[in-house]
Structure formats: C-alpha cells, structure tokens
Image (tube, rainbow, N blue to C red):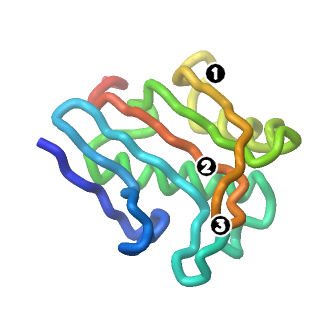
Amino acid sequence: MRRIIQVANGPQYDETYPLSQGVETETFVFANGMAFDNDTRTRMAEAVTIADETRIVMESIGSVLADAGATINDIVKTTVYLSERSYYDEMNSVYKTYWQPGQYPTRATVYVGIGSECRVEIDVVAVKGASR
C-alpha cells in the first residue's frame, strides 16, 4: 500500500510542484512541511518569525501524520533544513516543545537554500504506533 496524503492544514502544492505533503505505507508515514503559500508561491504571511514558521511547519506535519493515524510522538527521524545558521536557536526553542524532554526523535540539521523564501523546512519519518 502507498497512499499520497493531502490535508488542508499543509502546504498546498499544485501540479507545478512535483512533491506531496506526505506518503503513507503500511508501517511508515513520510511527511514534510514548509510555511508555503501556493497562492503567492512564497512564505506564508503568518510566518513572521522563525518561531512562527517552525510552529506552522510542525502543525502541518502533525496534520499529515493524523491523516495517516499517526502522531508527532510516532516520529523516529527528522531532518531540519534552515536557510541560515543564525535561525537554529529560535527554531530549536519551538521544535523541542513538541516532545517530552528525552523523548526526541533522531535529527539532522542542515543549512541550505530553501525555495519560495521559506527559512524552515522539516522532513520526518514516523512509524505508525511507535508511541503506543
């Protein structure tokens, strides 16, 4: 089984963007999030600060996971992409609030160019039922 996930509370990629919000399999959910506004093809207006942008991204990922019957606590691996190193502390201050201390997934953080003026992008792998 392979199912493409498309939720309202996520980046609304149209057919010009060859990617999905998430993909569900029997065991795994693969999801990504950006504070992307398809209408303007740039960062959402609500993503004023890095903290705002990180919250938007994490909430979007949570919605994708929920559509597949998973939760943030089922995430086992994340990759955080930041457009500048100086955003790390602010992103991290929000990111860490999504898990109990000591219960964080493994993570890599990479500094790269991110399209559409977005500054934070997060990619996750979740195992369904991992938190049960």
Q: Secondary structure at mark 2?
A: strand
Q: Which residue is mark 2?
A: 121
Q: Which residue is mark 1?
A: 101
Vertical order, 94 against 4 (above or below): above
Farthest residue toward the right? Answer: 86
Nearer the observer: mark 3 or 2; the answer is: 3
Name the residue rendered at 45%, 66% in the picture. 9
Q: Which comes sooner in the sequence, label 2 or label 1?
A: 1
Q: For this view, does 32 lie left or right of residue 86?
A: left
Q: Which mark is residue 116?
A: 3
User: Residue 49, how many percent across, how many down?
Assistant: 80, 59
Nearer the observer: mark 2 or 1; the answer is: 2
Q: Residues within 10 Å of mark 3 (few under 14, many from 20)?
A: some
- In which quarter of the view is residue 73 placed? top left
User: Residue 66, how many percent across, how many down?
Assistant: 34, 49
Vertical order, 17 against 103 (above or below): below
- Amino acid type at mark 1: Pro
Q: Secondary structure at mark 3?
A: loop
Looking at the rendering, in which quadrant would you find the N terminus? top left
